Amino acid sequence: MTTPTGPSAVLASLPPPQEPGDADWPGVDDPDALRALVARWLAGYGSAGTRRTYAYALGLPVSWADAVTGAEPGDTGGARPPAAPRGRLHHLAWFRWCAARALDPRRATGAHVTAWLHALDAAGARPRTRARMLSTVAALYADLVEQGAVAGNPAALNRSRLGLSGASREPSPTIRLTAAQVRALVDAAATLPDRTRHAELYRRRAVAVVALLTLGLRVSEVTTLDRDDVVVTGGERVLRVLGKGGRRREVYLPAPAAAAVDAYLAHRSPDTRPIHRGRSGPGEPLITRRDGTRCTRFGLYALLRRVAAHAGPELDGVADRVHPHALRHAYVTIALEHDARLQHVQADVGHASVATTQHYDRGLRRRAASAADVVSEAIHGTDALPRRE
């Protein structure tokens, strides 16, 4: 007898989104069929980070996102970042909200989704958070409609009536760091105290991590960088970054960032030469932990917190609010404050935009069409920049 394989079979062996003591999947008579539908939906996303984000947002065990690729449950090896800790709204994630009411998600109506959004509101979820969670649920049901599992999308609601139409345009709650504060983080990383015999490697690694985050990279993008993602193209050193949706983009390396990465790699191993396009590189992580394994999101978050705590008076009152996304946010705000073109900034940080994608085809990217040097100049000063013709 042949054992079934594929995403559906793997998910069938995994636990459902339940709280301790619950039934297999409250309100669902055929949980394996529902798991198969969810598996097919998750498997449609090429990025492990996207699959994990969606699984977590729906209240599913994050191991489901790995299982659809055949990975062992709980496996976080390779390029996969670790799972985020449970937040205060975890019990109100869509599938868990349904399970608490013994509601089969396939029988949910618009009234159910509206009641769920009101429950999130009562729990203190911000409009941005509710809008993001609604978008995730809507994406799931759009796929279920295509699969013929449901007749319509119950999450296709009038967002204006729900007060969510302008949620994405609300001011970001992320702390806004100035160029001087980012510079203080760079300086603090270079003097980070460490009493082990790896102190110098630890400091160089910290400087390299801060330098990469000041390029506007997502923390998940930093964790998935390999050494062979540092390439020379068009006479310029760039990072080939794997962003959301499995899309690659080129991020230019200003002189300070390139020097920080080179210094770290030189101390870690002697071969720091960037590869040329078309050649294969060593295929190892760009940033590693002390044992040589790939860094994790949690590790970089903890490292940046230590750097911020060591940054001195420049970070007084905000050090405990510094996290990787704050540096990505700083890249955008500093660039725009110094009159960088909005389209250049969007291309640098990989924001999803049809207009940007059409105008900035990867083959047309040039250093002049990047805000990297503008931000680097604001942080490090003019002397740190290469001369432009």
Image (cartoon, rainbow, N blue to C red):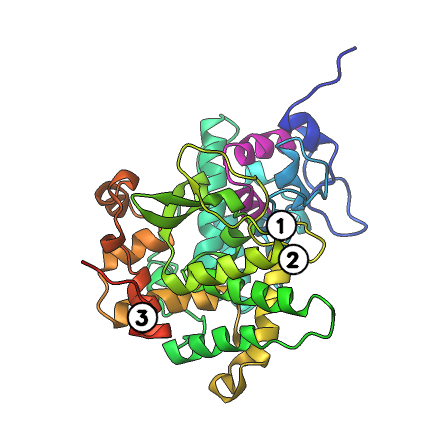
Question: What residue does disc 2 label?
Answer: 91
**Residue 163, can we see it?**
no
Magenta stretch containing residue 51, yes or no? yes
Which amino acid, by three-letter code, is at mark 3?
Answer: Glu
Could you give the CA–CA distance between mark 2 and mark 3, rounded to whole angstroms? 45 Å
Q: Is residue 254 above or below residue 322?
A: above
| Magenta region, residue range | 33-55
Q: Mark 1 or mark 2: which comes first in sequence?
A: 1
Above or below, comparing residue 124 to residue 290 in the picture: below
Q: Is residue 260 left or right of residue 180?
A: right
Image location (x, y in percent) of residue 49: 54, 46
Q: Nearer the viewer, mark 2 or mark 3?
A: 3
- Residue 298, quarter of picture: bottom right
As helix, strand or loop, the secondary structure at mark 2 comes to helix
Residue of label 1: 59
- Viewer-nearest residue: 35 or 293: 293
Q: Amino acid at mark 1?
A: Gly
Looking at the rendered structure, which numbered label has been put on residue 377?
A: 3
Q: State which tag comes first along the sequence, 2 or 3.
A: 2
Q: Amino acid at mark 2?
A: His
Q: Is residue 63 above or below residue 371?
A: above
Figure quadrant of the N terminus: top right
